[in-house]
Image (cartoon, grey):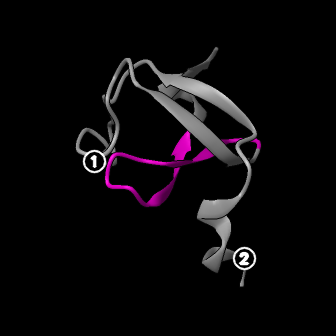
Amino acid sequence: MIHKTWENNATVKRIKCVHNNAEKFVVDNVLTPGKIYDVKNESEEFYFIIDDSERMGGFYKHYFEEE
């Protein structure tokens, strides 16, 4: 049931979106280049953040750079 409290987890770190040009997925409506996002969880390939739709989302790390 981790998905019920995931959005309330402590922030692990902050990252900056560097682009939202995706080949396969539509991310330009939920990520804003230049915006800073709080990372709630992380895996080898993904950052899990609260995106522009105010919901938790998992995104490839190549959209971001660490501050």
Q: Nearer the viewer, residue 21 or 17?
A: 17
Disc 1, SS? loop
Placement of 62 over or under 60, stated as above or below: above
Q: Quadrant of the N terminus?
A: bottom right
Left or right, 13 with reference to 55: right
Measuring from the top left, give residue 56's x and y in whole percent: 50, 59
Residue 60 location, quadrant = top right
Residue 2 circle label = 2
Magenta-drawn stretch contains 55? yes
Three-letter amino acid code at disc 2? Ile
Tell us which disc is closer to us: 2 or 1. Answer: 2
Q: Please tell me which residue is depicted at 64% across the width and 62% down the height of the picture.
A: 8
- The residue that label 1 is drawn on is 26
Left or right, 54 with reference to 47: left
Three-letter amino acid code at disc 1? Val
Distance from disc 2 to disc 1, alpha carbons, whole Å, reads 26 Å
Placement of 3 over or under 57, stated as above or below: below
Q: Please tell me which residue is depicted at 27% across the width and 48% down the height of the picture.
A: 26
Q: Please tell me which residue is depicted at 75% across the width and 47% down the height of the picture.
A: 43
Q: Please tell me which residue is depicted at 40% across the width and 24% down the height of the picture.
A: 35
Left or right, 54 with reference to 39: left
Q: Which residues are magenta?
A: 44-60
Q: For the residue carrying disc 1, how many other residues have a C-alpha within 10 Å: few (<14), some (14-19), or many (20+)?
A: few
Measuring from the top left, give residue 2's x and y in whole percent: 72, 76
Disc 2, SS? helix
Placement of 46 over or under 55, stated as above or below: above
Placement of 8 over or under 28, stated as above or below: below
Residue 17 circle label = none
Measuring from the top left, give residue 67's x and y in whole percent: 64, 14
Q: Nearer the viewer, residue 3 or 59?
A: 3
Measuring from the top left, give residue 3's x and y in whole percent: 63, 75
Residue 21 location, quadrant = top left
